[in-house]
């Protein structure tokens, strides 16, 4: 939302006298926590400072920036895009409209991936459709002995992932611009291939939902039935897995059976799904037929 719309809606134009009055105004149109986090971003203050010094004044530039951010949040733009960062697996990641905002449920995918790798020394892992790098960087942080390949077709997304790699000093992560693994060697080198690909069907109304409509469409939908990415992964990932290696993905709440069928058709065994905290099957894994002793 442009700053002009703030005036059009009749919102106050005079400078806020204090941080406290700015928060009071913002709470009329956005959530209390959102208001506080936006003000923290504008002022460069933490929560404790805002609580301890509500009487601190706002400068004119801070006032203008805060009003504009509150208007954009009220229009549905994700908070993470406005503050420029989001939390994931205990880390703070840089985010922008070039990447999806990392979701809490994707942390469960990381946890399962780590479990699959428990008895695998110095694993080779690929994260396909890495976006901000959230999954690859979380795995790299938990397994410093791992070598990770993080792939995305979007150069803009990889630029964000590179910022996060440097910020977190995860030198064991390699970034690559590619469509899945189409340009990568077909040698079976990976112990685990993990992905949270675009899985929303093109006509799904959720694409127009609050927040989602601001995210990169290509990271959300395949512009088809929501399964195109899994078909590509089944074709490209399985030949590049070592014997005993795992293919693990996140998917929609109603796609577990379809993904499991694709995994079995591709020759994977021990295919299984897991539920998210809401009780929906949201992740599916399969193993390349036996040879490895882990998993």
Image (tube, helix red, strand yellow):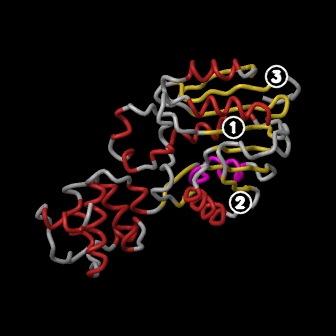
Q: Write the start and end of the magenta stretch as one range.
A: 131-142
Question: Residue 121 appears at what percent x and percent y?
Answer: 85, 42
Q: Which residue is drawn at 62% across and 50% down?
A: 152
Mark 3 — residue?
Answer: 289
Labelled disc at residue 170: 2
Q: Earlier in the sequence, mark 2 or mark 3?
A: 2
| Residue at disc 3, secondary structure | loop
Residue 140 in magenta stretch: yes
Q: Quadrant of the C terminus?
A: top right
Quarter of the figure with the N terminus? bottom left
Q: Is label 3 or label 1 in front?
A: 3
The residue that appears at 39% across and 71% down in the rendered structure is 49
Q: Does the magenta stretch include residue 172?
A: no
The image shows residue 262 at horizontal and vertical percentages of 64, 22
Residues marked 3 and 1 touching at CB (< 8 Å)? no
Count neighbours of disc 3 (C-alpha within 10 A) and say few if under 14, some if 14 to 19, many if 20 or more. some
Vertical placement of 100 versus 288: above or below?
below
Q: How far apart are marks 2 and 1 (CA)?
A: 18 Å
> What is the spatial separation of the Cα atoms under label 3 and label 1, in whole angstroms?
18 Å
Query: Which residue is at a point 47% across and 36% down the rendered structure image?
Result: 223
- Element at label 2: loop
Report the side of 46 relative to 152 (left or right): left
Residue under label 1: 113
Reading the chain from its start, which is encountered first: label 3 or label 1? 1
User: Horizontal and vertical percent for residue 6?
Assistant: 18, 65
């Amino acid at each position: 939302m442009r700053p002009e719309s703030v005036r059009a809606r009749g919102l106050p134009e005079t400078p806020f006298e204090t941080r406290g009055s700015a928060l009071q105004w913002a709470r009329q149109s956005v959530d209390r926590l959102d208001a506080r986090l936006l003000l923290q971003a504008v002022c460069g203050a933490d929560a404790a400072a805002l609580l301890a010094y509500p009487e601190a004044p706002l400068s004119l530039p801070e006032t203008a920036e805060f009003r504009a951010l509150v208007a954009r949040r009220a229009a549905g733009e994700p908070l993470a895009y406005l503050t420029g960062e989001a939390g994931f697996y205990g880390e703070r990641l840089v985010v922008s409209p070039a990447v999806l905002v990392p979701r809490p449920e994707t942390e469960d995918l990381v946890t399962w991936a780590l479990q699959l790798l428990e008895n695998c020394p110095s694993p080779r892992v690929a994260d396909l459709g890495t976006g901000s790098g959230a999954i690859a960087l979380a795995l790299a942080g938990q397994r410093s002995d791992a070598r990770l390949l993080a792939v995305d077709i979007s150069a803009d997304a990889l630029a964000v992932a590179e910022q996060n790699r440097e910020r977190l000093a995860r030198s064991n992560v390699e970034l690559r611009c590619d469509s899945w693994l189409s340009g990568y060697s077909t040698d079976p080198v990976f112990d685990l291939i993990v992905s949270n690909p675009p899985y929303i069907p093109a006509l799904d109304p959720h694409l127009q939902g609050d927040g989602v409509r601001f995210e990169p469409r290509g990271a959300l939908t395949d512009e088809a039935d929501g399964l195109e990415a899994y078909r590509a992964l089944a074709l490209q990932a399985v030949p590049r897995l070592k014997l005993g290696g795992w293919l693990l993905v996140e998917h929609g709440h109603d796609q577990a059976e379809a993904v499991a069928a694709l995994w079995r058709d591709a020759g994977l065994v021990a295919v299984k799904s897991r539920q998210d905290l809401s009780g929906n099957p949201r992740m599916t894994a399969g193993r390349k037929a036996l040879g490895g002793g882990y998993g």
